[in-house]
Amino acid sequence: MTADQPSREYLKSAPGRDPIIIEGLFRAAPERVFRAFTDPRDVCSWFIPKSGSLEEVQIDLKVGGKWCFVIDRSDENQIHFEGEYLVIDPPSRLEFSWRHVKEFADGTRETTDTSRVAVTFTAAGKATEVRLCHEAIKTEDARHGVGAGWNGCFERLADFVMELEREPGD
């Protein structure tokens, strides 16, 4: 997305409400869009909104497996999202727990309460309808931030999927 393009709106729930509902239609098969959520290289291409990037992605794709997406790292601390996979049903459903963590050099951690994310991938002709439900975020301010964050991620996911269409063999 360039600066002159309008922002796309994927947030379907009222801002600040629980649960947060994000929906989008992506021009790729469910298997490919599911992989965008579960392959570390793909996640690095779209997960952070705007022009940011992830420092590191770890995915242990099995029920009970851990995931961790590092968004910032310095000598003093590391900020990341982490959780555990709860349901993996390729290519139609993915559920995982979610925490925002600030980890300090001395090993101490500040974490949000654990919330839950459920993502469904439904074939729609040659496209995939993705519905993400993020629930149990404790504060309205946090829900505003998470909703805006997921909306930005879906904008980048749409751009990522459009780039895939241009690549031969995928």
Image: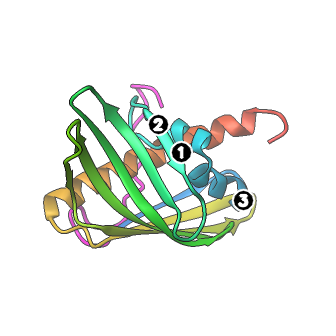
Sequence-earlier tag: 2 or 3: 3
Helix, strand or loop status at disc 2? strand
Sequence-earlier tag: 1 or 3: 3
* Separation (CA) of disc 1 from disc 3: 14 Å
According to the image, what is the colour scheme of the structure?
rainbow
Q: Residues within 10 Å of mark 3 (few under 14, many from 20)?
A: some
Magenta segment? 1-19
Image point (18%, 69%), residue name: 138
Which is more foreground, mark 2 or mark 3? 2
Helix, strand or loop status at disc 1? helix
In the image, residue 47 above or below residue 94: above
Q: Is residue 7 visible?
A: no
Amino acid marked by disc 1? Leu
Which is more foreground, mark 1 or mark 3? 3
Amino acid marked by disc 2? Glu
Q: Residues within 10 Å of mark 2 (few under 14, many from 20)?
A: some
Mark 2 = which residue? Answer: 56
Image point (60%, 60%), residue name: 61
Image-based side of 126 in relation to 12, left or right:
right
Where residue 157 is drawn, which disc sits there?
1
**Front residue of 126 and 74:** 74
User: Which quarter of the figure has residue 69?
Assistant: top left
Image-based side of 155 in relation to 77, left or right:
right
* Separation (CA) of disc 2 from disc 3: 24 Å
Q: Position of residue 134 (x, y in %)?
A: 36, 67
Q: Residues within 10 Å of mark 1 (few under 14, many from 20)?
A: many
Image point (60%, 65%), residue name: 62
Q: Is residue 51 visible?
A: yes
Q: Position of residue 22 (x, y in %)?
A: 42, 62
Q: Position of residue 89 (x, y in %)?
A: 65, 72
Where residue 31 is drawn, which disc sits there?
3
